Image (spheres, grey):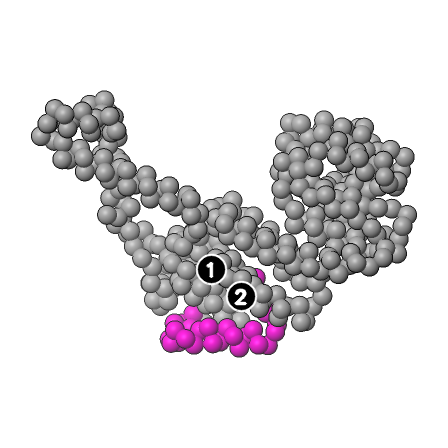
Amino acid sequence: MTLNSCELSVKKVKSYRKKTSFNPIKSVCYYKLLNIDHFDKVLKVFSDFILFLFIQQFKMVNNIKTVFSIKDLENLSGIKAHTIRIWEKRYNILEPMRTDTNIRLYNLQNLQKLLNITLLHEYGYKISKIATYPEDKIPQLVREIISKKNSQNYAITSFKMAMMNFDQELFFNTFDWLISEKSFKEVFKEHFLPLLKELGLLWQSETITPANEHFMSHLIKQKILIYTESLQILKPTKTDRIFVLSLPLNEIHQIGLLYLQYEILSRGYKTIYLGESMPIENLQDLTRHFENITFVSFMTVQPNRTVINQYVKSMGQKLLLKNNEIWLMGSMVEHIDQSNLHERIRIFDSMEETIEEIQ
């Protein structure tokens, strides 16, 4: 039975219930006991309904996306849905599946092919020409472009495909190619940072699942930690200040803070990384062991805008001893009232601005 027929059965159940006060679970047994003629039909509708619920639950539990709408393809490739439809109709470059209501659906192979075609198109290949190529020539041409090592867009595309296919090997190969030509700072700023910003939008639009986003975020964190460790083993060259990095309570988005630690260490300072969901009272413990602390925190989704000003005020009261400072950044800082802010609490609009401040 198709998903559409399941959905149709659910509509039948709802319609039947409106007309007869029908409860699908209780009524199956009731109709059976009364031996009503329509029991077989009711049982069929009920079984379809249960199957539909099972499918929905299965999709939620596995949380892995393998089928995409044309809007998903637009979000991932940057090619407008209208253009994709034209390319399909005129050049037959993709072969989507169709639902009973003729809605286009695409698999991972379609997505990969479109991303490759997009890259070739950006490098001057005409769609009419690409459409004449055998299936194996398109990835071959992409590999030739890669071999020239001059395609920033390819790296982003490759990371996206690694994410969609849960392909660690592709991620590592792409990273190794980039790092052979660039510093880690360049790779992060030119490739990881734009990718992460795009992932946020893709997640918001439900183009990717949390599983995709977590997979890619973990691999990026892994690389940051590897390069951070190479700096942590070095003795600090600047001892006039120590940086304590943490996230507010219930805040779990660490990548920005992890990379900022790498930048601080590269400038010769000592850092103490405390990570996610750290209560202010626990940060206060550090003031008993160190002086001249700069407390650094990213506020991506927490604290809530209704309590953020009270939260920042509490930070100031408990942490601003002697020459300590507090540096705050992230999307939630726009809700901080800066009119009565303590002079040693600094608000930064971006990570780049924060990095520039580290002398």
Mark with earlier residue (2, 1): 1
Q: Nearer the viewer, residue 164 or 281?
A: 281
Residue 230 seen: yes
Q: Is residue 280 left or right of residue 343?
A: left
Residue 79 x, y percent position in the rendering: 47, 59
**Which residue type carries mark 2?**
Leu
Asked if the residue at tag 1 contacts the one at tag 2, i.e. Cβ–Cβ closer than 8 Å, the answer is: yes
- Residue pointed to by mark 2: 170
Residue 274 x, y percent position in the rendering: 72, 43
The verdict on residue 132 being magenta is yes
Residue lying farthest to the left in this orientation: 37
Residue lying farthest to the top in this orientation: 21
Q: Is residue 69 left or right of residue 150?
A: left
Secondary structure category for the residue under label 1: helix
Q: Residue at x 19, y 27 (%)?
A: 29
| Magenta stretch bounds | 127-156
Above/below status of 158 relative to 349 = below
- Residue pointed to by mark 1: 165
**Which residue type carries mark 1?**
Asn
The verdict on residue 340 being magenta is no
Q: Nearer the viewer, residue 227 or 93?
A: 227
Q: Give the CA separation, mark 2 to mark 1.
A: 9 Å
- Circle 2 packing at 10 Å, graded few (<14), some (14-19), many (20+), is some
